Image: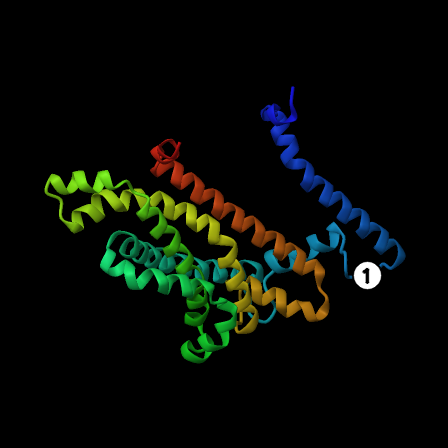
Amino acid sequence: MRLINRHPDRTGRLALAILPFALLLFAYFSGSMARLADNPNDKLLPSATQMADAVDRLALQPDKRSGDYLFWRDTASSLQRLGLGLGIAALAGLCLGIAAGTLPLFGAPLSPLLTVLSMVPPLAILPILFIVFGLGELAKVMLIVIGITPVLARDLEQRAREIPQELLIKAQTLGANTWTLILRVVLPQLLPRLLIALRLVLGSAWLFLIAAEAIASTDGLGYRIFLVRRYMAMDVILPYVAWITLLAWAMDHGLRCLAQGCFPWYEGAKA
């Protein structure tokens, strides 16, 4: 049997999925044991015990100055900013995508504008955002919005253009006006694609959030990572990075389940 035609069963697929992570962990802890054996004060590759102690100190013990549990306060602050940014960007991207992909009079100016805006590196305009919006929460949220809205809008615009013209023509022959076409024909086609597009930009959204928190913030996951880097506190940095990765995966999985639950017909329609 050719290799291209061989498919693992459910158990084999699970084992193959776990294998690369197991190899990475084995390589890391092997290196950590070797470095700590030579120098017990080495900070580059902390042991599992050192990382567990750091997490216990930040997540399970209140801070002596503020009384807060820093790990959970950082998580709540970052998720609040990320949720606001993603929500605003999703709404704006959906409206712009519908306008650019469905209405020719709006698409003519919007389409090239969205193309140009999507090419602007959001991190390059971060100083401008801090000048315009200040150093508060608004600038951090706006960085996420500006960073991913053009990408979402362009993706949804393309999806709107792919809607068969026969559907639009048939709806019009039945008396549908523009708003009815958008609400009853276009919008149901774009909502599942919006959830997929959000999954694709999650990594970028986290990147913009961490960058904003690192530069101007007093809490948040990105703030904590860049705060302790000066002490080479890898026992804090690595668990925080792993936690961010877990949160991003959970959000991606949640969006996937939401898409499958709300729009079970979408995958079949694509096929």
* Percent coordinates x, y for residue 230 in the rendering: 69, 71
Q: Nearer the viewer, residue 241 or 100?
A: 100
Amino acid at pointer 1: Asp
Q: Nearer the viewer, residue 125 or 240?
A: 125
What residue is rendered at 12% in x and 40% in y?
173
Whether residue 135 is visible to the viewer of this picture, yes or no, is no
The mark tally for this picture is: 1
Circle 1: element type? loop
In the rendered view, tell whether residue 66 sits above or below residue 1.
Answer: below
In the rendered structure, the answer to whether residue 189 lies left or right of residue 173 reads right
What residue is rendered at 37% in x and 48% in y?
194
* Percent coordinates x, y for residue 90 in the rendering: 36, 55
Which residue lies most toward the top here? 1
Provide the residue designation for mark 1.
42
In the rendered structure, the answer to whether residue 114 lies left or right of residue 165 reads right
User: Within the image, what quadrant is residue 70 found in?
Assistant: bottom right
Q: Quadrant of the N terminus?
A: top right
What residue is rendered at 84% in x and 55% in y?
36
Which residue lies most toward the bottom here? 131
User: Within the image, what quadrant is residue 164 found in?
Assistant: top left
